[in-house]
Amino acid sequence: MKLLHVGFSNSVSIDKIVAIISPETAVAKRLRDMGRESNNLIDCTMGRKLRSMVLTDSDFIFLSAMRPEALMQRMERPGTAEEAVED
């Protein structure tokens, strides 16, 4: 299973990622509010400024302090995403 490092020792399965979006849009703010209400919001910013939101197919939303462009580059370049042992 390949994992995407989203900052501060937190990772998300690349296979589960649906989108990586910027948090400034009205839609992103609504998604964040809905995720908070349904307990599907996972804050990986460690108190830093929110710069991107990672949406997954299991309705979880990961908040990251990394820019969307940086996360996309990590996904596209081989060897930059963390790899874990398959079960």
Image (spheres, rainbow, N blue to C red):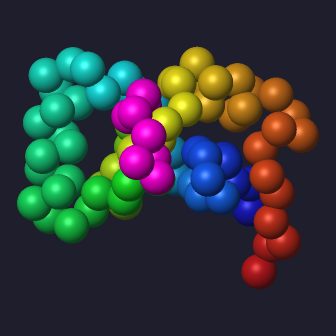
Q: Image check: 42 left or right of 13?
A: left
Name the main secondary structure of what is drawn in magenta.
loop
Magenta part of the chain: 45-52
Left or right of residue 20: residue 11: right
Q: How many marks?
A: 0
Q: Give coordinates of residue 36: x percent, y percent.
A: 17, 57
Query: Magenta stretch containing residue 36, yes or no?
Result: no
Q: Position of residue 45 (x, y in %)?
A: 45, 47
21 w.r.t. 8: above or below: above
Quadrant housing the C terminus: bottom right
The residue located at (64%, 24%) in the rendering is: 70
Q: Quadrant of residue 21?
A: top left
Q: Residue at x 72, y 32 (%)?
A: 74
- Residue 11 vertical position relative to residue 51 in the rendered view, above or below: below
| Residue sitting at x 29%, y 57% | 41
* Image-quadrant location for residue 85: bottom right
The reply to whether residue 19 is in sight is no
| Residue 80 location (% of width, % of height) | 83, 38
Q: Quadrant of residue 1?
A: bottom right
